[in-house]
Image (cartoon, coloured by chain):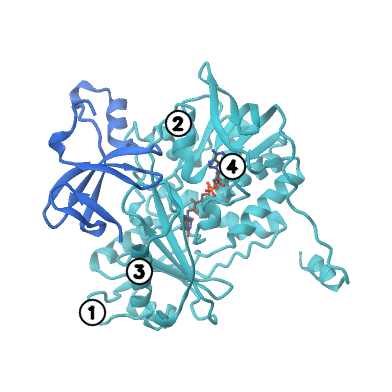
Amino acid sequence: MVLRLLKYGLRSDYPVTGDIPVTPTLKPAYDVVIIGAGGHGLACAHYLSKYHGIHDVAVLDKGWLAGGNTARNTTTIRSNYITPQGIAFYKEGVTLYEAMSEELDFNVMFSQRGQLTFAHSEATLRSFHLRAETGRHMGIGIEVVDQKGVEALCPHLNMDYGGALEVLGGLWHPDGGTARHDAVAWGYAAQAARRGVEIHQRTEVTAIEVAGGRVQAVVTNRGRIAAGQVMIACGGMNYDMALKAGVELPIRCYPLQAMVTQPVKPWLHTLVSSVSLHTYLVQSSRGEMVIGGGSDPYQLYSTRSTLDMKEHLAEGAVHLFPFLKNLRLLRQWAGITDMTPDYSPIMGESPVDGLWLDCGWGTWGFKATPVAGKRMAECIATGRVPEILQPFALERFERFALLNEMGATAASH
Amino acid sequence: MKLLSCPLNGPRNIEEFQYLGPLRGRPDPDALSDADWARHLFRAENRPGAMLEWWRHRPSNYVFLAERHTVTNAVIRTFDPSELEPGA
Ligand SMILES: Cc1cc2nc3c(=O)[nH]c(=O)nc-3n(C[C@H](O)[C@H](O)[C@H](O)COP(=O)(O)OP(=O)(O)OC[C@H]3O[C@@H](n4cnc5c(N)ncnc54)[C@H](O)[C@@H]3O)c2cc1C
């Protein structure tokens, strides 16, 4: 990669390569149809074509490439979850991010700066100890740090000594980091396209045909496509899409809002998060302060922002770092998040043969983009659900085998 | 500021209210299979469109129903639970 970069830099004409081909004409049938060209759908297409020899794949998106939650997320990547099943899964995700730029031959700017979560109460601190013990047992980097430790890791923080929101300690997760979300999607898209995968933008799925308990075809605004297998990876529209095949998912949709400030010089190295304030911050590579994440308090299919939510985020950010008060907001946005009852995703088989689910990614799915893509490709290619995905099956709800990650996702990312 | 019209207190700032989720049936747990009971517990109305849902006005602790469109966010009507048609 370095040598190639040097060679490119020394050229006089800097040639442009078109990574993603224009939308081709739609064929009447494909072996695999993936609904949703977000990070998840594109990653799955990459793994299918590179590792399983499956090239007759169409990835369909009603909008433009990765314009859903992949474009709207705040790019926190971490594995400090609560359940052993969750940690094992997200740990594989972090490992794949570490190698992603090489894998995709595309710089995704993975920046493993570590994540620090603050405890403002004894109860939170106790829950951190449990997470640290479980995490260490599962082999991730995680430890509880005291006030001195927090100050050392994050010297600009308002510790609020003696105040109502005194920082009592923190959960330090050196494996945590961020990556450039567009690059992740484009990298997977470019690789998949190079191996014959067709990416169809502005192709909206309006119906899914099922006969004899098996998926037959999808109907789009550009025509009907017969499909051997279909995967649903529609982000905020997962509930609605599954319903088109008669599958009712335990999902409720809420907008999640975030925002960025004007750029400033680098000052915040770690990713920081406060459970009590429902606020987290990271400084982007452009210097902007990325601030998230407030979920609207009621169900809604909308990507509008609201003043009250932005005020709430600003309040949390300014409490943690009072000197931010003079910064101006540059952009604000929201994405529709598909929330499950236990804050864990729904992956694997559906009640319809040949219809695969990569759903329930809510406020936490960007970090899982590579691992979900890799493991869902394995499902499609082999017809078997790998062990690491089995706990996330839809039928866990019928078995009352929920995977409660609410405490690890409460600050919504 | 978004307003919600409370059947008891009239139009109030929506921040005074708590959302309690979609209206759901009240099946007899003994009459249901485990699968149907799980469905009752974990699945809730989430279709894009008009939906009946519970709200509470916090200061007066008054619980009522609203019909709201989950795409446009328009509140179609709010009403006292006693006005709920049977079977709704
Ligand atoms: C504000 C915000 C902050 C977040 N922060 C984080 C974070 O810090 N860390 C983290 O891990 N996760 C985060 N998330 C969650 C994360 O963004 C998502 O879980 C993840 O991006 C999901 O990726 P996806 O590819 O499954 O879905 P998406 O990227 O949403 O892609 C789904 C695609 O499906 C398409 N589609 C929908 N309906 C149809 C149809 N009928 N026909 C064809 N195509 C259709 C859409 O156009 C879209 O492009 C955040 C989310 C939001 C909204």
Relative to the observer, which residue lies in front, B64 or A400? B64
- Within the image, what quadrant is residue A137 found in? bottom left
- Tag 3 and tag 4 share a subunit: yes
Residue A82 in the image: above or below residue A169 = above
Q: Determine whether label 2 and label 1 are within 8 Å by CB.
A: no
Which corner quadrant of the image does residue A310 belong to?
bottom left
Tint applied to chain A in the drawing: cyan
Q: Amino acid at mark 2?
A: Leu
Disc number for residue A62: 4
Q: Secondary structure at mark 1?
A: loop
- CA gap between label 3 and label 2 equals 36 Å
**Ligand 1 closer than 8 Å to label 1 CB:** no
Circle number at residue A163: 1
Residue underneath mark 2: A243
Q: Residue at x 61, y 39 (%)?
A: A377
Please name the residue shown 54% across and 41% down the image.
Answer: A233
User: What tint does the image give chain B?
Assistant: blue
What amino acid is labelled 1 in the image? Gly
